[in-house]
Image (cartoon, rainbow, N blue to C red):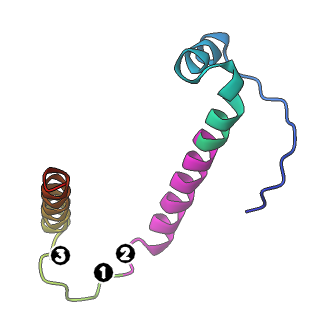
C-alpha cells in the first residue's frame, strides 16, 4: 500500500462526525477515518477469502471437524485457550 497522501472529500452524518471528534478530536479525524477504512478493507478481504475457500476442506479428514457443530466447538476451544494464554501472559508481566 502506498504511503502517498491525497486529499479527499468524505460525506458522513453530522452526528457521527461529532462522535468521532469527541473521541479523537477534530485534528485527528483523518487518522481515525484512515484507520477505520483500513480495518474495514481488511475485514472485507478476509470475508472474500473465506467465501472463496469455503468448503475447500470438505473432503479432508480433520479430527474434530466432522460436522459444522464440531468445527465450531473446535474453534471455541481454540479461542478459549488463546484467551487463557493472553491472560496468563498479562498477569506474568
Using residue 36 as the reference point, say whether residue 67 is left or right of it. Answer: left
Using residue 31 as the reference point, say whether residue 63 is left or right of it. Answer: left
Image quadrant in which you'd find residue 11: top right
Confirm or deny contact between disc 2 and disc 1 (CB under 8 A): yes
Q: Does label 3 or label 1 sit earlier along the sequence?
A: 1
Classify mark 1: residues with Cα within 10 Å, few (<14), some (14-19) or many (20+).
Answer: few
Query: Which quadrant: the N terminus?
Result: bottom right
| Element type where label 2 sits in the image | loop
Instruction: Determine the main secondary structure of the stretch shown in magenta.
Output: helix
In percent of width and height, residue 22 lies at 55, 14
Find the residue positioned furthest to the front.
93
Confirm or deny contact between disc 3 and disc 1 (CB under 8 A): no
**Any magenta on residue 50?**
yes
Residue located 52% across and 21% down the image = 23
From mark 3 to mark 1, how far is it between C-alphas? 9 Å
Relative vertical location of residue 51 with respect to residue 23 in this rendering, above or below:
below
Image quadrant in which you'd find residue 68: bottom left
Residue located 57% across and 24% down the image = 24
Marker disc for residue 58: 1
Q: Does label 2 or label 3 sit earlier along the sequence?
A: 2
Q: Which tag is nearer the camera, tag 2 or tag 3?
A: 3
- Which residues fall within the magenta stretch? 36-56
**Any magenta on residue 37?**
yes
Using residue 83 as the reference point, say whether residue 37 is left or right of it. Answer: right
In percent of width and height, residue 52 lies at 50, 71
Towards the viewer: 43 or 49: 43
Residue placed under numbered mark 2 in the picture: 55
In percent of width and height, residue 62 lies at 19, 85
From mark 2 to mark 1, how far is it between C-alphas? 5 Å
Relative vertical location of residue 74 with respect to residue 64 in this rendering, above or below:
above
Residue placed under numbered mark 3 in the picture: 65
Amino acid at each position: 500500500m502506498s504511503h502517498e497522501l491525497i486529499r479527499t472529500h468524505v460525506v458522513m452524518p453530522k452526528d457521527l462526525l461529532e462522535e468521532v471528534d469527541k473521541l479523537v478530536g477534530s485534528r485527528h479525524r483523518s487518522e481515525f477515518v484512515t484507520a477505520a477504512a483500513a480495518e474495514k478493507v481488511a475485514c472485507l478481504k478476509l470475508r472474500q477469502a473465506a467465501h472463496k475457500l469455503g468448503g475447500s476442506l470438505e473432503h479432508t479428514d480433520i479430527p474434530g471437524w466432522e460436522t459444522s457443530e464440531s468445527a465450531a466447538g473446535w474453534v471455541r476451544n481454540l479461542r478459549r485457550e488463546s484467551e487463557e494464554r493472553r491472560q496468563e501472559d498479562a498477569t506474568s508481566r
